[in-house]
Image (cartoon, helix red, strand yellow):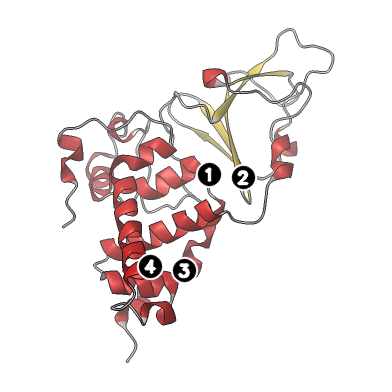
Amino acid sequence: MVSPHHFAHWYPTAAYLYVLWLDAFALAWEYLRRHPDYRLDWLRRARRSDAGHRWGLRLLEDPALDARDAHPAWLPGHTGVVQLYHDADPPPDAAAFDFWNIPGHKHLLHDGKRLALIARSPGYCQRYALAPGLEDGMAIAYAHRGGAAAPACGHAPGAALANARPRPSQSALLELHTLQALDATLAGASLRDVAEGVFGVDAAAGWYSDGGLRSKVRRLVRRGDALMRGGYRRLAQLAPLEKGRFEGHAKRP
C-alpha cells in the first residue's frame, strides 16, 4: 500500500530544487512565509501599511508566493543591497546604468519607498536600490552600507553574475533539506516520514536501528523551526527578534 505522504506537497524533493539557487534574502523569505502567525497577519492585516514591520518587511508579501515569484521588501540597513545614484561629476571611465545589459532575470518593484531592482541567475542574486531620477545611460555611482566593497570603477552593475557557480554547495543542500523537513512537520508528518521523504525509502528502512539518521532528522526539524520563528532575520541581516509576545507562539499546534 502506498503511503498517503507520497502524495503530499512536501514529499517530492524535486519540488525544492529551486532552493539550491537562492541567496540569503530569498531563503529568509522561504522560512518567514511558512510562519503560521505571518500567514494570519497576511489574511487579517495585509492592508495596514505598518503590518510588515514586526516581521522585518516594509510591506506584507503574499506567503503563497515562493522566492521565485515573491519580492519581499526588507527593511533597510543590510549590506546586501547596492545603492545606485546618478553621478553628477563622473570620471571619463564611469560606468553607465544599462538596464538591459544586466545579466539575469530582472524584476523591478516599488517597496513603498523606493524603486528596487533584483537580478537573478543560477547561483547568484544581486539587489539594487535605484535613486530617484536615475535613467538608462546615466553615469552611476555606487554605495554600500557598512563599508562593503563597491564594484570596481568602470564595471557595470551585474558584472559579477558572470562568475556564478552552477554547482550547488553543501550549505544549499542543507537549506533544501531543512525546508522540506519543515514543510513535512508543519503538515503533521512523523519524523520517520520526514526521513523517507528527505533521504529516501531505502535510507529510512533502518529508522529504528539507525540512531544517526534519527538524530539528523531531528536536527533538520529543529533548525527549520528555529529559522521560521525568528532565525530568518539573520539571513535577511535584520536585528535579532526581541523576547516578548511576538516570539511567544513558538509551540507548534
Examine the image and state in which quarter residue 6 appears.
bottom left
Query: x%, y% of residue 197?
Result: 39, 72
Q: Are marks 2 and 4 in contact (CB under 8 Å)?
A: no
In this rendering, the count of numbered labels is 4
Examine the image and state in which quarter residue 4 appears.
bottom left
Q: Earlier in the sequence, mark 1 or mark 2?
A: 1
Looking at the picture, tell me which residue is in the foreground, 92 or 97: 92
Secondary structure state at the residue bearing disc 2: strand
Q: Which residue is mark 3?
A: 13
Q: Which residue is mark 4?
A: 10
Please tell me how crowded label 2 is: few (under 14), some (14-19), or many (20+) other residues with Cα within 10 Å: some
Tell me if residue 96 comes above or below residue 3 in the rendering: above
- Look at 67% across and 50% down and name the residue there: 165
For badge 1, the amino acid type reads Asp
The N terminus, quarter of image: bottom left
Please tell me how crowded label 1 is: few (under 14), some (14-19), or many (20+) other residues with Cα within 10 Å: some
For badge 2, the amino acid type reads Tyr
For badge 4, the amino acid type reads Trp
Q: Are marks 3 and 2 in contact (CB under 8 Å)?
A: no
Q: Are marks 1 and 2 in contact (CB under 8 Å)?
A: yes
Marks 4 and 1 sit apart, C-alpha to C-alpha, by 21 Å
Q: Which residue is mark 1?
A: 23
Query: x%, y% of residue 87?
Result: 70, 13
